[in-house]
Image (tube, grey):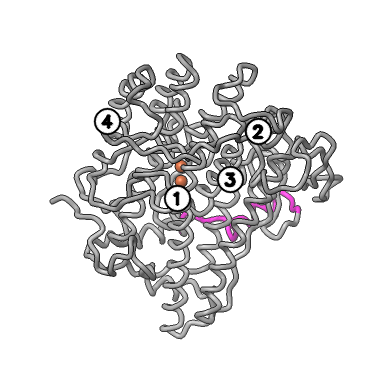
Amino acid sequence: MTIEAVDYTTKIPNNVNLAEDRQVLRALEGWHPGYIDWWMDMGPEGFQQAEVYLRTAISVDPKGWAKFDYVKMPDYRWGILLAPKEEGRTIPFGRHYGEPAWQDVPGEYRAMLRRLVVIQGDTEPASVEQQRHLGKTAPSLYDLRNVFQVNVEEGRHLWAMVYILQKYFGRDGREEAAELLQRRSGDADKPRMLGAFNEATPDWLSFHMFTFFTDRDGKMQLESLAQSGFDPLSRTCRFMLTEEAHHMFVGETGVGRTIQRTCEAMKEAGIEDPNDVEKIRALGVIDLPTMRRKLNLHYSLSLDLFGSEMSTNAANTFTAGLKGRFQETKIQDDHRLEKATYPVLKLVDGEIRRVDEPALTAINMRLRDDYAADCQRGLDRWNKIIDKVGVGFKFELPHVGFNRKIGEFKDAHVSPAGKLIDDAAWQREQGQWLPSKDDGDFIASLMKPVTEPGKFASWIAPPRVGIDNKPGDFEYVKIAA
Ligand SMILES: [Fe+2]
Ligand SMILES: [Fe+2]
């Protein structure tokens, strides 16, 4: 592997030799002002002049790729960074299995590939838009810094996809790049492309659930694109995954700290029953049943992002060698899947059953299964926190058929336990399973900003260690007067 140094002398830091790629440099420089306008309009509201202790990627060497320093967000060095090129890399799956990876767009797959890049690209700015009001109610300077870190990196991920579009797709790539700055999360006329990215992120529990569940969908998509036979896409996604790990960390520890604070407050107050909601809420913490409803919502919205269980589109992008499976190169099979089957959950004669289907058309289902297993590991760690404090409560992932808008279960009502129920039962019970307006109002009532270094809101525990090993009272954000 060769690690190309990152060039910081150009306006756009990069390790793709932009200085000598005049045409692409010009296209990116042309796009830059529109990006900054978008960031000022749709990025974190009210904190553009604040000094934020951020990490910036300065290398793609896994051993030391980032540095930390105070930066005003609009001055963040958004760059184009690709993971090192692997000499002799071959296409790891599909019809072209074993052939040399493509360094240019294969003509026959051009439209399919562009679509994959645009869909991934669209999610990146969407989440920044969804999270733009959160700064005003941050539970601490530590958390404030974390949301901004996630935001600037999602911005960089947009740059990453725009680079691919502008370098490899000519004029229509430039048009797509421009449109990525025009769509808006939740907009009636020009919404973002995927459902979960048009939902509101009204409070910090939603934000932490979103980074746990929805950014994790992003991780799975990036993992499968990192397998791509189109090498520039593979390399850009591989580097994005190093940043993405922090987003998962923010979500998992954010929810974990919320759980911990609630359990500790219950213990201190001598409350044993996690369903004693009124008393628990009076302590200024979020009761576990409310967190369960939020979990149910965010998990089910994120499952929809995987698309239909059975999909010819997914089969085509796999066979073409454009989008693989999670950890494709570690799977022991022929990587072509022409004769293989995969068990798919389906509705058959009024029952939920596993049915063997062609593995190629079940690619989405497989990725979703890998995602569910990854989520479960996080839940296990949350449950350990509850156990340790000694509260009798357990988080579980709801059944994959629960509350779905896309795929096999979209017209069925399925309880979190996986029972098919009728419309009347759904109407009667759903209030126990999904967050109510009252839940939202209660959470909103706790969202009061805490801006004194080292202090935290009543509903969330401090982190165990600081970012970049900073001490507990470190001033992660210097809010401009
Ligand atoms: Fe991202
Ligand atoms: Fe992310």
Q: Residue at the spot x=31%, y=67% of the render? A: 456
Evaluate whether residue 351 shows in this view: yes
**Residue 147 percent across, percent down from the top left:** 36, 51
Residue 49, compared with residue 472, is above or below; it is: above
Q: Residue furthest top?
A: 171
Q: Residue 304 versus residue 288: which sits nearer the camera?
A: 304
Q: Are marks 3 and 1 in contact (CB under 8 Å)?
A: no
Binning the other alpha carbons within 10 Å of mark 2 as few (below 14), some (14 to 19) or many (20 upward) gives many
Q: Which residue is mark 3?
A: 220
Sequence-first disc among 3 and 1 = 1
Q: Which residue is mark 2?
A: 91
Give the quarter of the image for residue 20: top left
Q: What's the mark number on residue 11?
A: 4
Q: Please name the amino acid that badge 1 sits on.
A: Pro
Q: Which residue is mark 1?
A: 62
Residue 63, compared with residue 116, is above or below; it is: below
Q: Residue at the spot x=86%, y=45% of the render? A: 349
Look at the image and give the residue range highlighted in magenta. 420-438
